[in-house]
Image: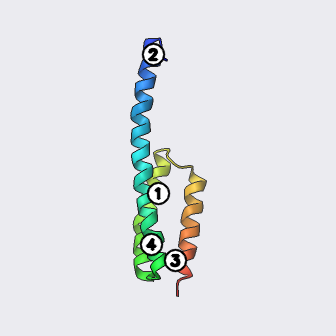
């Protein structure tokens, strides 16, 4: 357990940061799931629009430190190639 005032403050800050990051991660996953569902249904127009909405949200996660840049790029690349392959 934290003993010094500084360690106690850092513990409080970590709790707040964890809650914020958890909410961001959940929000991003929701957007990605919407793209996945559109791909699964075979609706190319819906998948493209969902992808357009998900992309800035995923990149915002990068700037906020929730995801690494390469991770987000990889996810976007794979999703966009799957959307393109829809007939």
Observer-side mark, 2 or 4, equals 4
Residue 6's label in the rendered image is: 2
Foreground label between 4 and 1: 4
Point out which mark residue 37 bears. Answer: 4
Counting residues from the start of the chain, the first of labels 4 and 3 encountered is 4
In the image, residue 65 above or below residue 83: above
Image position of 82 with respect to 19: above or below: below
Between the residue at mark 1 and the residue at mark 3, the CA separation in whole angstroms equals: 17 Å
Distance CA(mark 3)–CA(mark 2): 49 Å
- Residue neighbourhood size for the residue with mark 2, other residues' Cα within 10 Å, grouped as few (<14), some (14–19), many (≥20): few
Query: For residue 30, which numbered disc appears in the image?
Result: none
Residue located beneath label 1 in the image: 58
Q: Is residue 5 above or below residue 19?
A: above
Q: Earlier in the sequence, mark 4 or mark 1?
A: 4
Q: Which residue is mark 3?
A: 83
Which corner quadrant of the image does residue 13 belong to? top left
Crowding near the residue tagged with mark 4, few <14, some 14–19, many ≥20 C-alpha atoms within 10 Å: some
Residue 5 percent location from the top left of the image: 42, 13
Q: Residue at x 52, y 77 (%)?
A: 83
Q: How is the image coloured?
A: rainbow
Classify 10 Å Cα crowding around label 1: few (below 14), some (14-19), many (20 and above): many
Badge 3 or badge 2: first in the primary sequence: 2
The residues tagged by marks 4 and 1 sit, at their Cα atoms, a distance apart of 17 Å
Q: Is residue 77 left or right of residue 59?
A: right
Task: Give the mark nearer the N terminus: 1 vs 2.
Answer: 2
Badge 2 marks a residue whose secondary structure is helix
Q: Residues within 10 Å of mark 3 (few under 14, many from 20)?
A: many
Q: Give the Cα distance between marks 4 and 3.
A: 11 Å
């Amino acid at each position: 357990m934290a003993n010094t005032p500084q360690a106690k403050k850092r513990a409080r800050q970590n709790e707040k940061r964890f809650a914020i990051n958890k909410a961001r991660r959940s929000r991003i996953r929701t957007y990605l799931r919407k793209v996945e569902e559109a791909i699964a249904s075979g609706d190319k127009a819906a998948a493209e629009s969902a992808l357009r909405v998900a992309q800035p949200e995923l990149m915002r996660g990068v700037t906020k430190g929730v995801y690494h840049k390469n991770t987000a790029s990889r996810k976007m690349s794979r999703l966009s190639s799957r959307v393109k392959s829809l007939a």
